[in-house]
Amino acid sequence: MMKVLEHEHPLKLVDLKVIKNEESDEEEEEKDHVPQDEFVCPCNRCGQEINDYYRYNYKCSLDDNSCDYSLHKFCAELPATLHHMSHPHPLELHEIPYKWKCEYCKRKHNANEVGYRCSSDDCSMLFVDVICAVEAKSRMIHHPSHPHPLVSLTTNPILCECRACGKEHKGIFFQCTTCSDFAIHIECAFLPKTLLIQRTTNDVFHHTHPLTLSYSFSKAEQSANYYQTCRVCGENFADDYNLWLYKCDKCMYYAHLDCATSRKEPFMSMLSSASWGLTIKNFKDADYRDLLHLPFPDQSCTILKHLFFKKVRPAATNDDEVSLQHINHQHELILVDTSEHIGSTMCHNPMKKIQLLCNVCVQPIMEAPYFHKCGDESCNFALHQWCTWLPKQIDNHPGHPQHTLVLLSNVPGVFFSIFKCALCTLRCNGFSYGCVECGYYIDVKCGFIPEKITHKSHPNHLLLLGASGSSRSRQYCYICKWFFKDDTESYYSCNVCDVYIHRECALFLPETVTHIYDKHPMHLSHLPIENHTSEYFCEICEHGLIPYLPFYHCDECAQSVHSACFPLILQSETETYSKDPDLTFYRFLNVKFGSIHKTDGHPHPLSFAQGIESDGECSMCKEPLRYKMIFKCLECKFAIDYKCCKRMKIT
């Protein structure tokens, strides 16, 4: 206990760190606690703030808390007599009964405030307030980020690097007298321990939960959280793992100090390439009436539907017959309208485990009218109606402008009609546009790749198709986060921001998909889901997934699916996901499986399929068949790799 001149009750010493630890233990017992406000109260002697960083303070010892009298520890323990270096006589502590003014700072004080008075009769009217008397001690703090006390050695700004934010700038710093290389800027030293990010960013960036100030982001913690980037600016965190940040561990939400607080000082300005943030629209809709806005809303939408749906006729006409002349198929094709279906053929519907793919574009047929074979039940040939209206040739294609590209039902010289698209590099057994002279072939969707698009991941800015061969100097895709392998990969880029997106990532991932085991649509996400408490894993392949790479998620059921697994929803009973890290989409997205074939090398019919784990090894080369294109017997365990099929005669 301690008695002071100006207060009638004894004072007791309080350790704020002990109190905070006790409160934290109580809060940990609650599942979803809201962080309590930081401790702040005024000092009744110096008038300055008492907070956690000073750690110790004296307060009135009355048990009923009816008296809120409090003092800094250094204010309460002021010596009765002080020898100040600026005055030749000793100074004595008094409760001064009249109004007075400090000789040094000229601050005015009321009667009965405590201050120092010169003990000499020659200058008895010289007064010094407690702030000026103990200025050095008042500039010492105990900061939880560092084990030693920190002192502000000068009131003049100095040029120094802040160990909190990692920025070098001029200002007032708290420095460690034990560790010569530790200093933090006064603005960083007193950052709030918790904040709601939308309160400081005008709702441009937001998060549901309060963010907590963390004094490090260790390599182990970053690795455990998939090396997350800042949710405000999209940039990585520095290699100095002791830099501070704001975070919500529950939702894997992390932000730089300057990003979370939107500090406007030159040394802590928002990054100019803040791609996750608010962008100002740089084009007029009237100038781009046919602009493609991505991602597509669902699987039923494609580039071809976007371009040619307006040409679709409501019913079969003579024009329809003309449109089918360049479709080479041995069976009669009939237009199925909205009111009927033929035989067992129905539209593609993952919820009912029905698959129907177009033989031209190899994309799902999810609505009528569409063309469908008539006759052979083993034939699964079908067409979107708009795919029958594709032009027979394309001039000045950006990938091959020197020659006209011609529509082909089969690429000449390739085995089993499977070719590698020169633009997206995916295997395809659909129709193609090609130049036979140069051996240049692309799938029909790549035949109409738009030169300008917009994308939800980087809204309001036009994205332009990049020219093949242009250097990207180690740029990475903004969606899948993988670096471009070489200069032959096609991409979209923003000419305002440093943003690049793989053409495939922009075009191949729809906004929503459906899952047979989930009655709700699953939405595309590139970031961890708020309030998602369990681990992230794919419902189809049952492997873990990285939540800041593209994946599909149902908020109501808390279920997730790899973006590369969603086309495999119909095969969800089997593990068919490829662990290839370079793909965020299904590697056989443009391959239509399911056709039945005969061969002289095996007595039973063979089905064209993707290999799964249970298919075992190739009957010829003995290599594993999983994740490969294969032919497998419908009656026995015979299965063969696509590459080995060239040795057999398959029809």
Image (tube, rainbow, N blue to C red):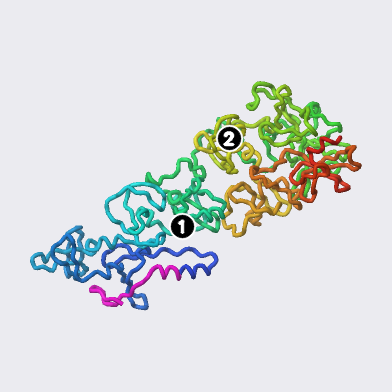
Count residues near mark 2 (Cα–Cα under 10 Å), then give few for <14, some for 14-19, many for 20+. Answer: many
Q: Amino acid at mark 2?
A: Tyr
- In three-dimensional space, the C-alpha distance between marks 1 and 2, rounded to whole angstroms, equals 37 Å
Q: In the image, is residue 17 part of the stretch drawn in magenta?
A: yes
Q: Nearer the viewer, residue 347 or 184?
A: 184
Q: Nearer the viewer, residue 592 or 326?
A: 592
Q: Note whether 92 is above or below 382 in the view shown.
A: below
| Residue, disc 1 | 214
Image coordinates of residue 485 in percent, x first then y, are 60, 37
Task: Magenta stretch: give its range.
Answer: 1-22
Left or right position of 144 against 291: left
User: Mark 1 falls on what kind of element?
Assistant: strand
Q: Quadrant of the C terminus?
A: top right
The numbered dot on residue 492 is 2
- Residue at x 73% of width, y 47% of height: 568
Q: Nearer the viewer, residue 19 or 319?
A: 19
Q: Amino acid at mark 1?
A: Ser
Q: Residue furthest front?
A: 621
